[in-house]
Image (cartoon, rainbow, N blue to C red):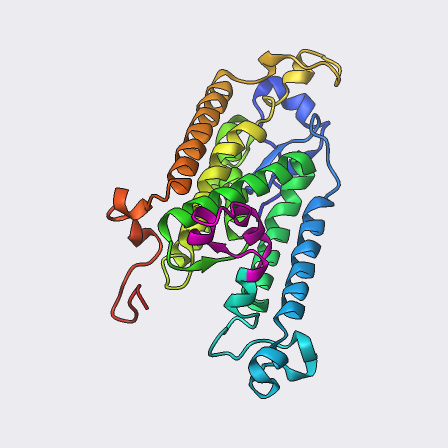
Amino acid sequence: MGSRDLEKNNNNFTNYATQTQTQTTSAGGVVDSSSDRQWTSWLVPMIVVGNIVVFVVAMFVNNCPKNSGRNYCVAKFLGRLSFQPLRENPLLGPSANTLLELGALQWDRVVHQHQGWRLITCIWLHAGVIHLFANMLSLVLIGIRLEQQFGFLRIGLLYMVSGIGGSVLSSLFLQQSISVGASGALFGLLGAMLSELLTNWTIYSNKAAALLTLIFMIVINLAVGILPHVDNYAHLGGFISGFLLGFVLLIRPRFGWRERHQLPEHLRVKTRFLPYQLVLLVIALAVLIAGYTVAMVMLFQGKNGNDHCKWCHYLSCVPTKKWKCGD
């Protein structure tokens, strides 16, 4: 995603820049790495393993040969782990009933049966092998680089909060269907990449290239969400959550600030951040808290988001001559 151009510093830092290493960021730019700790990524691989294990458990519980008949199952050689018939699940996975049993997101159960835990459990479930593979590949490509730069704690918090944000928005607008998958959390990482680029704008060398590349990725992924049977509300909820949280968690000190002031690594001073970074942090945190509070209140009061936004249904599906969104 990124190129390894040398950092283009101003004249005051030319000598310093020739003596320090550069670091390619997940957004495609290059930043100073002299004051950044390079973390070892272990959380993202563990999340990938966890999702795979949960999927195997789901297939074991599903038991297609017993519940649907062996002759109707796909990949019969897998025995109990074989997939549901393609007409029922074209993504090669379990039945909808199995997903519901294991914690899939459904508005009625969350609101009327007080099963709020489904907002979290649905993040770890996937509809099929294809769904799982696409999400885990994206997580590896995006998440490992972010964890190496910012550490497991911040990326783990970002992943979970974004996933819950996607679940909440999905529940508000899609009340007649079930939803599973880590897409909301993944879009949260994409949103955080964008806010990280904006809040740390001054330390990037190839700003325009990084911004255009990232915006292109985001637009393409969100555009796919307007197809039928894709929960774009989860994508949008996760993206917005991650975008706001990125201003809070992924803020970096200004380039060369510590070196100019000859400060030791253990000394932390507030002025190492630029004023606009702190302003963005405060605004993003306030909007995030307010947004989650309002959304949660609306959800558990049984509100339908479509009643308050007549055009929002186009965000998840745009009808064409080829398909109808109600199908």
Q: Is residue 270 left or right of residue 292?
A: right
Image location (x, y in percent) of residue 166: 47, 46
Task: Based on the picture, tell me whether residue 93 belongs to the magenta stretch.
Answer: no
Q: Residue, x 73% and y 37% (percent of image)? A: 39
Q: Residue, x 38% and y 40% (percent of image)? A: 301
**For residue 105, above or below residue 28:** below
Task: Based on the picture, tell me whether residue 110 belongs to the magenta stretch.
Answer: yes
Give the image quarter of residue 323: bottom left
**For residue 13, above or below residue 225:** above
Image location (x, y in percent) of residue 223: 38, 55
Give the image quarter of residue 50: bottom right
Image location (x, y in percent) of residue 22: 67, 34
- Which corner quadrant holds the C terminus? bottom left
Q: Is residue 299 left or right of residue 205?
A: left
Depth check: give the residue in front, 327 or 3. Answer: 327
Q: Residue, x 40% and y 63% (percent of image)? A: 229
Residue 151 shows up from this direction: no
Depth check: give the residue in front, 168 or 107. Answer: 107
Q: Residue, x 33% and y 58% (percent of image)? A: 317
Q: Which residues are magenta?
A: 101-125
Image location (x, y in percent) of residue 133: 60, 63
Residue 13 shows up from this direction: yes
Depth check: give the residue in front, 235 or 273. Answer: 235
Q: Is residue 52 left or right of residue 215?
A: right
**For residue 270, above or below residue 216:** above
Name of the residue lying farthest toward the bottom: 71
